[in-house]
Amino acid sequence: MFIKELELINFRNYLNLKIEFSKGLNVLYGQNAQGKTNVLEAINFISSLRSHRTNKDRELIKWGKNKAYIKAHLNKSLGDFTVEVLIPEMSKKEAKLNGIKLSRASEVIGNVNTVIFSPEDLRLLKDGPDVRRRFIDNELNQIKPRYHYYLSLYNKVLLERNNLLKKGIDRSLLDVYDQQLAEYGSFLIFNRIEFIKKLSIICKLLHRKITNGKEELIIKYKGDILDGDINSIKERLYSLYKNSIDEDIKKGYTSKGPQRDDIEVYINGVDAKHYASQGQQRTAALSLKLSEIEIIKGEKGEYPILLLDDVMSELDLQRQKYLLDSLKDVQIILTITSLNDLEKFNISRKKIFEVSNGNIEIKEF
Ligand SMILES: Nc1ncnc2c1ncn2[C@@H]1O[C@H](COP(=O)(O)OP(=O)(O)OP(=O)(O)O)[C@@H](O)[C@H]1O
Ligand SMILES: [Mg+2]
């Protein structure tokens, strides 16, 4: 899959932008705070309907304006298609697919596949479990049709259950919540386990390649329930909620369930979060991200668009080369502050844009 053209109106520091991308490598260069990441953020937004930088959509709207608009012309092997998203300040987001308005904006999720890699992702192993859960959820939102829907239902009921635990409880209402959480949560856990299984196989191979056979990477899902079909997960999850009620009342929140799950990563048999060097952790994060690309290709039959935000300068030369050389069939949009960083690579199909204060000019293609 690739994006042919992006149009932005009142998005971040862009008043009105139209930009045509190449199918291969696109380089957005410019000084700090000019709007490079904003472009990647917009492309990622039409994929997931959320920003990778903020939970507040209103931050995406240009200051002084009341709505932002993103339109993208894309291509898949099946043909061209367009996606439009409107982000109003006061009302709900709206989305169109091929010009037709969707009844819920979230229905657009899954049509555009992207993998975004920014400096924060290099800390994927080091940071808290929420970051790794988001990594799994983002991927599953793209490849599993109902995942996003179940995740939002789960989170909604979880919030209500937690409120009830804090306020003083009504046990019959709590049981209704537990049944709903077990229903939605079992879908999440089942799909996460399947995903981690696939991820661990691909990641192990890729990591071996990137490290020239020096390191073995093992990934494991960490949670209260680690196997089973969806019904058995549902039953066990329901019992977990039931059995932890006293603890939950004491704590004032729900202590068991998929909202607590995590991934464990081992490099050469050792827990990477606590013992791997910074360089090893970054390389493992790179392997995880690259595996994400392969999984999307496997599930969707198309490579996602790869958005690389400022990561080149954070990786050593060997890793940078690997990144650009191993992804010849993937459309890449990367941001960089100095073009000198690219000179050492021999890349043929590339288009270079200069980004300056909310304006973008083509420099070379
Ligand atoms: N809602 C908004 N309205 C107008 N301008 C905004 C808005 N949000 C952010 N900006 C501006 O966008 C600019 C930041 O853009 P962006 O993060 O894309 O920079 P960048 O080119 O990626 O910089 P760096 O190289 O530092 O990462 C800042 O100047 C910021 O003030
Ligand atoms: Mg940036």
Image: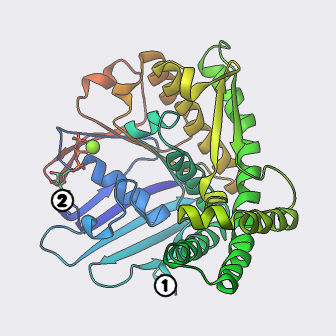
Q: Residue at x 60, y 58 (%)?
A: 259
Q: Of tags 1 and 2, which is closer to the observer?
A: 2
Give the number of the disc on residue 13: 2
Q: Which quadrant is home to the N terminus?
A: bottom right
Q: Is mark 2 on a helix, strand or loop?
A: loop
Residue 220 position, x and y percent, is 71, 38
| Rendering quarter of residue 63 | bottom left
Q: Do the residues labelled 1 and 2 touch (CB within 8 Å)?
A: no
Q: Residue at x 50, y 75 (%)?
A: 163
Which amino acid type is marked by label 2? Asn
Residue 271 position, x and y percent, is 63, 26
Residue 226 position, x and y percent, is 79, 49
- In the rendered structure, the answer to whether residue 65 lies left or right of residue 71 reads left
Query: Does the beta carbon of the residue at mark 2 sit less than 8 Å from ligand 1?
Result: yes
Q: What element carries label 1?
A: strand
What is the crowding at mark 1: few (fewer than 14 residues within 10 Å), some, or many (at least 20)? few
Q: How far apart are marks 1 and 2 (CA)?
A: 28 Å
Which amino acid type is marked by label 1? Ile
Q: Can residue 110 be seen in this view?
A: no
Q: Residue at x 37, y 51 (%)?
A: 21
Q: Residue at x 58, y 31 (%)?
A: 287
Q: Which of marks 1 and 2 is nearer the N terminus?
A: 2
Q: State whether residue 179 is above or below residue 191.
A: below
Residue 103 position, x and y percent, is 52, 87
Q: Is residue 46 visible?
A: yes
> Which colour assignment does the render follow?
rainbow
What is the crowding at mark 2: few (fewer than 14 residues within 10 Å), some, or many (at least 20)? many
| Rendering quarter of residue 129 | top right
Residue at the spot of label 1? 100
- In the rendered structure, the answer to whether residue 171 lies left or right of residue 139 reads right
